[in-house]
Amino acid sequence: MQYDILRRSIVAKALPILLLAISASFLGSDKATARQYPWPDSAEVTVMTPDSLELVGNLYWPKSTKLTKLPLVVLLHQTAETHGAWKHLVDVLCASDFAVFAMDLRGCGYSIYDFRTGQNRPPNTFYIGERARYPADIRQLVKKLFTERGKMLDSTRIAVVGAELGGNAGLLYAVDEPSVRFTALISPGLEYSGLQIGKAIKDYGERPLFMATAKLDIYSMESLNLLSDVVPRLLDAVVFDTYRYGNALVDTEPQLVRMLTDRLRKYLK
């Protein structure tokens, strides 16, 4: 009996010390793994398309009330991904004083609510030929963005960065948008889901165009070689010795992130 009382007394005294040690461990862990960049501010932007689908995008900007008329970078994800695939790049660009707009392409992420049925469609499902609407979707949602947040954005300084299918859609959008000063295609392809860019690259004119792909991404490498024959400018391209493609290429190649940031500073600042 006396032994039980003594044991409970020892535990009671030791418990606060143990909890304090655990708390300190968690705090130390958080500090060690703290984000390299500050959390940006953000706002959601939505619009209904002519065929009654809700498109959703997220605007991010640096945590500074002194910044106005920020250059805008539009990020377009690859097939079957969402705007969240750009998380690291969003942090880097906001830390460099860019505003960033990452949208969910129709049928992906939150861009799945159908007003005709009053419910969400299953993610990554499409009507035949529906992805051909992507360039018009981008245009409509970016226009809504400037309607709601135009005071903080510079409508004359826009860049587009797209991964795989998102890159094709972004280039097709940029062709008819002279305010787009720079476009980057990550894992470019001559055609993704019906979106062909051979002619679009010619129509894009002399504006700066950057391409990045992986040596083991056979389709993109072949596309890059063919596109280099029709690009009416000095080709700005880089090939990485990896098998990664699209958003994964951006996430695993710090040099690519630096190259993108440097070019955005050059052409938008």
Image (cartoon, rainbow, N blue to C red):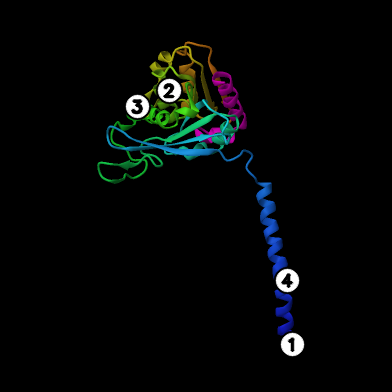
For image coordinates 61% across by 32% down, the residue present is 254
Side of 225 where 128 appears, left or right: left
Q: Is residue 2 above or below residue 103?
A: below
Camera-nearest label, 1 or 2: 1
Whether label 1 touches label 3, CB < 8 Å: no
- For disc 4, the marked residue is 14
Q: Is residue 37 above or below residue 26?
A: above
For image coordinates 54% across by 21% down, the residue present is 268
* Image location of residue 226, percent across then percent down: 46, 17
Residue farthest to the left, as pictured: 116
- For disc 2, the marked residue is 171
Task: Decide which of 24, 207 is in the foreground and name it.
Answer: 24
User: Which numbered disc, 1 or 4, marks the residue that appears first in the sequence?
Assistant: 1
For image coordinates 54% across by 35% down, the residue present is 90
Magenta residues, dominant SS class: helix
- For disc 3, the marked residue is 136
- Give the amino acid type for the residue marked by disc 2 in the picture: Leu
The quadrant of the image that shows the C terminus is: top right
- For disc 1, the marked residue is 2
The quadrant of the image that shows the N terminus is: bottom right
| Residues at marks 2 and 4, CA–CA distance in whole angstroms | 64 Å
- Give the amino acid type for the residue marked by disc 1 in the picture: Gln
